[in-house]
Image: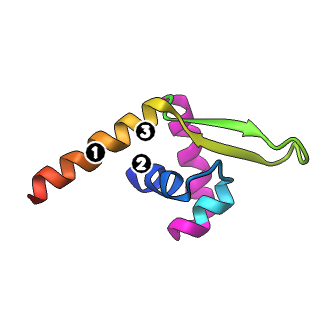
């Protein structure tokens, strides 16, 4: 989850599953499955591409941003 949301956050823009897979060096099917699971938990949202309805973009939700930030601050505290 953190790798997926972290990649989406670092990309800094709504991104397709293919963009996330390429950026994070994960298999497309893994990214697609994780995107679905994270959307069910409310951590990411999907938006359809207006030009190509077969394509969708993922956005990190406000809750996903909070979870990611909490995880990163916990990591920094553990390292410090």
Q: Which mark is residue 65?
A: 3
Q: Mark 2 and mark 3: span between their CA atoms?
A: 12 Å
Q: Quadrant of residue 53?
A: top right
Q: Position of residue 42 (x, y in %)?
A: 51, 28
Which residues are drawn in magenta?
22-41
Residue 2, placed above or below residue 48: below
Q: Can the viewer see residue 26 in this picture?
A: no
Q: Badge 2 local density, few (<14 within 10 Å), some, or many (20+)?
A: some
Looking at the image, is mark 1 or mark 2 earlier in the sequence?
Answer: 2
Q: Mark 1 and mark 3: span between their CA atoms?
A: 10 Å
Q: Quadrant of residue 6?
A: bottom left
Picture mark count: 3
Foreground of the two, 44 or 27: 44
Q: Quadrant of residue 66?
A: top left
Left or right side of 23 for 5: left
Q: Mark 1 and mark 2: span between their CA atoms?
A: 10 Å
Residue pictured at 49% horizontal, 58% vertical: 10
Marks 2, 3: nearer the viewer: 3
Residue pictured at 54% horizontal, 30% vertical: 40
Marks 1, 2: nearer the viewer: 1
Q: Badge 1 local density, few (<14 within 10 Å), some, or many (20+)?
A: few
39 inside magenta stretch: yes
Q: Which residue is mark 2?
A: 1
Looking at the image, is mark 1 or mark 3 earlier in the sequence?
Answer: 3
Q: Which residue is mark 1?
A: 71
Badges 1 and 2: C-beta atoms under 8 Å apart?
A: no
């Amino acid at each position: 989850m953190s790798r997926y949301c972290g990649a989406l956050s670092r990309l800094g823009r709504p991104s397709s599953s293919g963009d996330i897979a390429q950026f994070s060096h994960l298999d497309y099917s893994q990214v697609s499955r994780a995107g679905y699971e994270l959307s069910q938990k409310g951590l990411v949202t999907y938006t359809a591409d207006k030009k190509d309805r077969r394509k969708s973009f993922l956005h990190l939700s406000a809750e996903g941003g909070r979870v990611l930030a909490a995880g990163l601050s916990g990591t920094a505290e553990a390292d410090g």
